[in-house]
């Protein structure tokens, strides 16, 4: 567990949010059949169309790694909001059984707010939320997307929100 936490990239606006996040990581109690590992997935070097890199979410905090320009835009939009207190990319990986197959899922972003602004609330974000960043052209079966949301909520008690368009992240 300690080795994998080194891969966890978290930027916090204040120390109290860092303490709260550490408490979430340490006290995650998962339902039967679901395994959660924080900081498990390393974002690979770009070898294709996506443009990975690093983003400075908050001054004086570690850079967070992103996989694409769309993910970079979402992280910057979240961090630019004064109510945003934490941004973590590729924060955790979940394993579970579904339809007889062992599944693995790593969401893109975990975000926390002091108080959720109306614009983010309208997109479904809550104080602590998990965000999946996918362009509109990427289709995910509705049943699988619902299963991802169910497992995230069961394991963390947070909603899973898909932000498919740059326009949503930039507004």
Image (cartoon, helix red, strand yellow):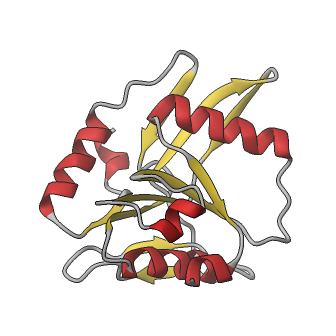
Residue shown at the point (23%, 83%) measured from the top left? 59
Quarter of image, res 10: bottom left
Q: Which of the two residues, 33 or 134, is positioned nearer the viewer here? A: 134
Residue positioned 53% across, 15% down in the render = 32
Above or below: residue 135 compared with residue 49: above
Is residue 165 shown left or right of residue 130?
right
- Pick the residue in front: 33 or 113: 113
Residue that protrudes farthest toward the top in the picture: 32
Q: Pinpoint residue 90: horizontal percent, then vertical percent.
A: 50, 58
Q: How many numbered discs? A: 0
Q: Nearer the viewer, residue 126 or 74?
A: 126
- Quarter-of-image position of residue 151: top right
Residue at (37% x, 56% y) in the render: 8
Quadrant location of the N terminus?
Answer: top left
* Residue 48 percent location from the top left of the image: 73, 80
Left or right of 171: which side holds 23?
left
Q: Farthest residue in the front direction?
A: 118
Quadrant of the rendering where the C terminus is positioned:
bottom right
Name the residue rendered at 52%, 73% in the picture. 66
Residue 120 pos. (x, y %)? 51, 66
Q: Is residue 51 left or right of residue 116?
A: right
Image x and y of residue 161, in percent: 61, 55
Residue 21 vs 62, above or below: the answer is above
Looking at the image, residue 70 sits to the left or right of residue 141; the answer is left
């Amino acid at each position: 567990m300690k080795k994998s936490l080194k891969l966890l990239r978290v930027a916090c606006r204040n120390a109290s949010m860092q303490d709260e996040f550490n408490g979430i990581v340490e006290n995650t109690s998962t339902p039967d059949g679901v395994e959660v590992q924080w900081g498990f997935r390393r974002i690979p070097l770009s070898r294709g169309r996506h443009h990975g890199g690093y983003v400075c979410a908050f001054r004086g905090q570690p850079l967070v790694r992103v996989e694409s320009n769309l993910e970079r835009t979402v992280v910057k939009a979240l961090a630019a909001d004064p109510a945003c207190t934490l941004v973590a990319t590729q924060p955790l990986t979940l394993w579970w059984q579904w339809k007889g197959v062992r599944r693995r899922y790593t969401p893109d972003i975990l975000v926390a707010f002091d108080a959720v602004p109306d614009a983010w609330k309208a997109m479904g974000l809550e104080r602590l939320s998990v965000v999946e960043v996918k362009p509109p052209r990427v289709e995910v079966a509705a049943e699988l997307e619902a299963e991802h949301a169910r497992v995230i909520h069961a394991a963390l008690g947070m909603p899973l929100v898909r932000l498919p368009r740059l326009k949503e992240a930039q507004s």
